[in-house]
Structure formats: structure tokens, C-alpha cells
Image (spheres, rainbow, N blue to C red):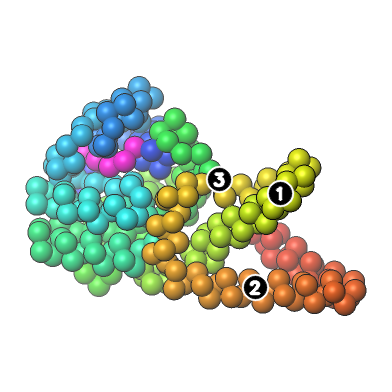
């Protein structure tokens, strides 16, 4: 199915960027924007991230694809609002960075309210410390990973629709189970946010040091500028996966402390070399 109407619920950084990317890549259908604030929707309209705007979420069910770009705790509620009026053939997906609870609740809601409408969990690995539609970029998803998390209940045709949409805007899709997604993202994304926040707080305890920080501190703590409310929900929903990663990080820090306390310069260099190789392998 080639969608003719794509509804974006929540036209902030991700939703706005998706709209801009669709248009830039030549999508010739209608891009509908939905949200709680008319002022935000009007901004999305002005920058041409969407073609139409509405405060009535129920109307989104008339689209071929609905992409929910809200905070993770709101996604199931949005599914519940859309489901009763969703037309046959509509596919609902999301962009949340935790998947197990979101997918489980969304599928349960749809089974009860509209069994003919499938939900496909999605998570584009792209973003910024900035937020809001004015931070949206048409190339945000170019060569970015987008993880899709189908279940045994996901129709292959629905998965194809969502995969083709993300690949159309330049993303590289990867299929994982919701459980495996949350496990890997705990390490790749959620632990780095906790670490950056902890580092910012630690250095902040020494006020004079903040006057001297340079690019190293700013690079390492950049993600700590993200919305605390948004990240509270993300971290809380994936806590059981994140806590073991924090334990592992503590073990590594304790090893650094031991090497420094013992004056083991050679051991310290070996440790730093391991980290250097791992970081360079990402590049």
C-alpha cells in the first residue's frame, strides 16, 4: 500500500522532521498535523512540515498511516483515542524510545476497540538536545537507524508500510523484538543519558569548575540538556533494563578508581586504550 494520507500526532522535533523529510523526498500525498496547541500546529504549517492541522485527534483515524510522536507515556492514550474511528487499512505506529510496555498496551487497546487496525512499534534513532517544531530538520533521519518492533500479531503488510515510510525518508530500518529493543537501547541510549546527567551534576557540585569547562565536558554532557519530564518517563519505563547497565558502569568506574589509587599508569593506559578502540569502532 502506498499511503495517500499520513497523520502525524505531535509535531515537535521528530514529528516536524518527519513531515519535512516526507515532503523533501517527494511524498505527494497529504501530511496532517495533530496536536494540543494550535500555536505549535500553526508553526508546523508555516514551515511546511504539514499540510493541514487539527486539534481533534479522532480525525487522524481517517489517514492511511498514523505516526504518534508524543512522549512515551501518552502513546497508548493516543491509540485509544484514534482506534474507534480508524478506518479499515489504517496502520498506527509510533516513535517512542521504549517499546515493551507501549507495544503491549497499544495492541491490547486495538484488540478491544478495533481489531482490524494494526500497531507497529517504531523508534527512529535520531534526535537533538533541542526540542520543538522549530528545531525540525528535513535531513534528520538521513542514514539514521530506525528500529521496528513487530510482534506475532503484526501483519507483514503493516510492517512493510511502516518500513517503507522510514526508508523513504532516508532511514536504515532494523527489526527487533520489543524486549531486545529495550535491552539494547538501555545500553546505547538510556545509560548514556543517565551518565551525562550524573556527570553534569557531579561537576556542578564544584561551581568554579563550571567556569572552566570546555568542549570535552560539553560534548559528553550534551544529552543532559534533554527534557527532564520526557526522560523521566523513558527511564522509568525501561528501569529494569537500565539498572543492570548502571551496575556495570559502576564496576568500570571502580576499576578506574583502583588503577588511579594504586598509581598503576600502565594499567590505566590499557584501560583508556580499550575505550579508545571501542569509540573509534563507532566512527
What residue is pinned by disc 3? 225
Rendered image: mark on residue 217: 1
Identify the mark nearer the N-term, 3 or 1: 1
Label 2: state its secondary structure: helix
Q: Which residues are magenta?
A: 4-11
In the visual, does 129 lie left or right of 84?
Answer: right
Which residue is located at x 51 percent, y 47 percent? 226
Identify the mark nearer the N-term, 2 or 3: 3
Q: Quadrant of residue 133 in the image? A: top left
Which residue is located at x 46 percent, y 72 percent? 241
In the visual, does 126 lie left or right of 82?
Answer: right
Rendered image: mark on residue 184: none
Q: Nearer the viewer, residue 206 or 44?
A: 206
Do the CB atoms of the residues marked 1 and 2 lie less than 8 Å apart?
no
- Predominant SS along the magenta part: strand
Rendered image: mark on residue 250: 2
Q: Nearer the viewer, residue 57 or 36?
A: 36
Quarter of the image for the C terminus: give it: bottom right
Label 1: state its secondary structure: helix
- Residue 44 picture location, percent across and down: 34, 29
Amino acid at each position: 500500500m502506498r499511503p495517500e494520507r499520513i497523520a502525524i500526532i505531535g509535531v515537535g522535533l521528530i514529528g516536524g522532521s518527519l513531515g519535512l523529510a516526507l515532503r523533501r523526498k517527494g511524498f505527494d500525498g497529504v501530511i496532517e498535523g495533530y496536536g494540543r496547541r494550535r500555536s505549535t500546529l500553526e508553526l508546523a504549517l508555516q514551515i511546511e512540515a504539514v499540510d493541514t492541522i487539527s486539534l481533534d485527534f479522532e480525525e487522524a483515524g481517517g489517514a492511511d498511516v498514523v505516526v504518534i510522536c508524543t512522549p512515551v507515556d501518552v502513546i497508548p492514550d493516543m491509540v485509544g483515542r484514534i482506534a474507534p474511528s480508524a478506518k479499515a487499512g489504517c496502520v498506527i505506529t509510533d516513535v517512542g524510545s521504549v517499546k515493551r510496555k507501549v507495544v503491549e498496551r497499544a495492541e491490547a487497546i486495538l484488540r478491544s476497540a478495533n481489531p482490524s487496525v494494526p500497531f507497529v512499534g517504531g523508534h527512529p534513532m535520531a534526535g537533538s538536545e533541542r526540542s520543538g517544531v522549530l528545531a525540525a530538520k528535513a535531513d534528520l533521519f538521513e542514514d539514521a537507524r530506525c528500529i521496528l518492533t513487530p510482534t506475532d500479531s503484526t501483519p507483514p503488510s503493516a510492517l512493510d508500510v511502516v518500513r517503507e515510510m522510514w526508508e523513504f525518508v532516508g532511514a536504515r530500518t532494523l527489526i527487533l523484538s520489543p524486549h531486545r529493543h529495550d535491552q539494547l537501547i538501555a545500553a546505547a541510549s538510556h545509560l548514556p543519558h543517565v551518565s551525562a546527567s550524573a556527570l553534569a551534576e557531579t561537576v556542578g557540585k564544584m561551581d568554579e569548575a563550571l567556569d572552566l569547562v570546555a568542549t570535552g565536558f560539553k560534548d559528553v554532557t550534551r544529552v543532559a540538556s534533554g527534557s527532564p519530564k520526557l526522560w523521566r518517563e523513558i527511564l522509568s519505563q525501561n528501569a529494569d533494563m537500565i539498572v543492570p547497565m548502571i551496575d556495570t558502569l559502576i564496576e568500570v568506574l571502580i576499576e578506574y578508581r583502583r588503577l588511579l589509587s594504586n598509581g598503576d599508569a600502565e594499567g590505566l593506559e590499557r584501560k583508556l586504550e580499550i575505550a579508545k578502540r571501542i569509540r573509534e569502532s563507532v566512527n
